[in-house]
Amino acid sequence: MDGFTSSAILYNYLRQNYIDYNFELSYHIPEGKEHGLEVLMPLLQKEKICDLIICPDSSSNDEEFHKILSEMGYEILVIDHHLASGYSPYATVINNQLSEKYQNKELSGVGVVYKLLQLLDERNDTRDADNYLDLVAAGICADMCPLLTLENRFISEYGFSHLYNSGLRELIKYQAYSILGVAASEITDWSEVKVNPIDISFYIAPLVNALIRVGTTKDKETLFEAFINGRKLVDSTKRGHKGELESIAEQNARNCANARARQNKEKEKATELLDIQIFNDNLDENKILILNADELETPNTLTGLCAMNVAAKYKKPILLGRTTPDGQYLKGSMRGQNGSELKDFRKFLLDSGYMDYVEG
């Protein structure tokens, strides 16, 4: 959700504030849950298709691809919050984790994009960045960023008290009874509606993340359209309403709910198979669970969710991976556990010398 909200507020801001400039603005949504330039390389290397590539919530660690694209004549702007070893010399990188001057390391990707929009506001003498604080707050909470930081706290308080985005509104309406204790039809004045981080974390983010994991490419395009142009009318896909129109935000909310139901079924099935693997191999005696997902009949996009589920169930750090085609590596997801003696699981893995790649 952080990546989608990052891209949505950037897209809407540029479209609104630079309409008089002679440029074309387009976006690309990866087929899977992956992010970063690697998924775009086959498209970008065929021929030069644009001048500037903007990577919200991704690509700080893609220096090798920055170099290739820079040599082809592309300019690259990275707006990110993920840990990285340093600034890429082949791209312009804005990353709060790398900055020595910026103190708030708890901002997610959408928060860093918001800071850029504030700068553009300052340069253009406008005040439009704050119009997107509802999506900024939603992205920060969905990415589990701490709200003890004053800046994050302000974004959360203001954003959830000023719900402007129609895509987000429709998701809240779909979960109205769980969040507000009322039917969706009873929401008549959005200025009086206020949600909180718990609402987003438990009732909104899981819907969006489920669609990103198991939805089709078309579903994900609908999700993004809901955040950038949610009032757009499209043919209804609701059962029994053929020939009618509905907003794309309404259609997306239903898509998200359906995707979550599919995801949960697949997750439960995968967890049962992993339980059998742990039992058969006596792995529950180990302090770290290292599991193979090759036999799971679930998409790669669910690996992280399954790892999180097993780590919480057994209260142990976990590595869950699939064997790479060359048979040399396990590639997948790693999850630490708060109650474990390993306070920094990522550092432990990096220091072990057995890991080729550990990021996130």
Image (cartoon, grey):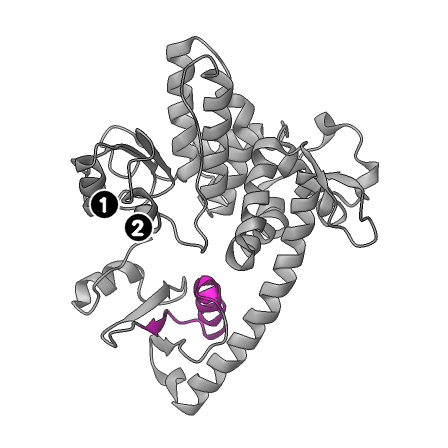
Of the residues under marks 1 and 2, which one precedes in the sequence? 2
Q: Name the residue type under label 2.
A: Glu
> Looking at the picture, how far across and down is residue 45, in whole percent?
27, 44
Q: In the orientation shown, which residue stands out farthest toward the top? A: 125
| Residue lying at 60% horizontally and 33% vertically, measured from the top left | 160
The residue positioned 23% from the left and 39% from the top of the image is: 69
Name above or below for residue 184 compared with residue 203. above
Residues at marks 1 and 2, CA–CA distance in whole angstroms: 7 Å
Judged left or right of residue 140, residue 70 is left
Q: Residues within 10 Å of mark 2 (few under 14, many from 20)?
A: some
Query: Is 298 situated left or right of 192 in this image?
Result: left
Query: Is 167 one of the magenta-colored residues?
Result: no
Residue 235, given in percent of the width and then of the height, sits at 73, 42
The residue nearer to you, when weighing 214 against 50, is: 50
Q: Residue at x 57, y 27 (%)?
A: 158
Asked which secondary structure carries label 2, the reply is helix
User: Picture coordinates of residue 48 (x, y %)?
Assistant: 29, 36
Q: How many marks?
A: 2
Residue 83 or residue 1, whichever sits in front:
1
Q: Callout 1, which amino acid?
A: Phe
Q: Secondary structure at mark 1?
A: helix
Q: Position of residue 285 (x, y in %)?
A: 37, 85
Secondary structure mostly seen in magenta is helix
Cβ atoms under marks 1 and 2 closer than 8 Å:
yes
Q: Magenta region: which residues?
A: 299-323
Q: Which residue is tagged 2?
A: 38
Q: Is residue 238 left or right of residue 79?
A: right
Q: Is residue 310 covered in magenta?
A: yes
**Vertical comparison of 197 with 157: above or below:** below
Q: Which residue is mark 1?
A: 65
- State the residue lying farthest toward the front: 47
